Amino acid sequence: MNAALTETTKVGKRGTVVIPASLRRRYGLKEGALMIAEACPEGILLRPAVALPVEIYSPERKAEFLLNNCITPEDYAWAVEEVRRLGLDPAKIPHERLKDN
C-alpha cells in the first residue's frame, strides 16, 4: 500500500472510526455517506456504498409495461386479460398498440 494513503486513527465509543480528512476529501466522503464494512483477510475494508431509490409501480404503470412489451397477437391478448385482472380498462392505458403483421 502507498504510504501516502496510509494514516492512523482510533476506534472510539460504539465502534466509531474517524476517517482522516485527507482521505475523505480524496474519496469524496461527506457526513452521512453510506459505507460498506467488509471482512477481509487483511482486516476490515471500508468502501463507499451506493443506495438507489426503489420505484413502486402503480397498477396503471404495470398495465402499461404489460401492454407495451407484447411481441405477438397472443402476447397482446394475454396482456389485455392481465390488465383486466388488475381491475383496469386496457383501452384507457396509454400504450403502443400491437400492429398486425
Image: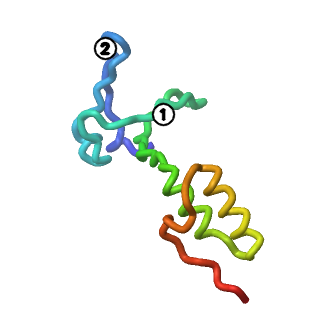
Location of the N terminus by quadrant is top left
> Which x, y percent locates residue 62?
55, 55
Label 2: which secondary element: loop
Q: Residue at x 32, y 44 (%)?
A: 4
Figure disc tally: 2
Q: How is the image coloured?
A: rainbow
Q: Which residue is mark 1?
A: 45
- Residue type for callout 1: Leu
Label 1: which secondary element: strand
Location of the C terminus by quadrant is bottom right
Examine the rendered structure and indicate whether residue 33 appears above or below residue 56.
above
- Residue type for callout 2: Gly
N-term-proximal mark, 2 vs 1 = 2
Q: Residue at x 33, y 23 (%)?
A: 17
> Which x, y percent locates residue 79?
67, 63
Asked if marks 2 and 1 touch (Cβ < 8 Å), the reply is no
Q: Which residue is mark 2?
A: 12
- Find residue 15 and name its label: none
Q: Quadrant of residue 39?
A: top right
Q: Residue at x 36, y 41 (%)?
A: 3
Q: Quadrant of residue 65?
A: bottom right
Examine the rendered structure and indicate whether residue 8 appears above or below residue 79.
above
Please indicate whether residue 31 sits to the left or right of residue 8 in the image: left
Closer-to-camera residue (17/51): 51
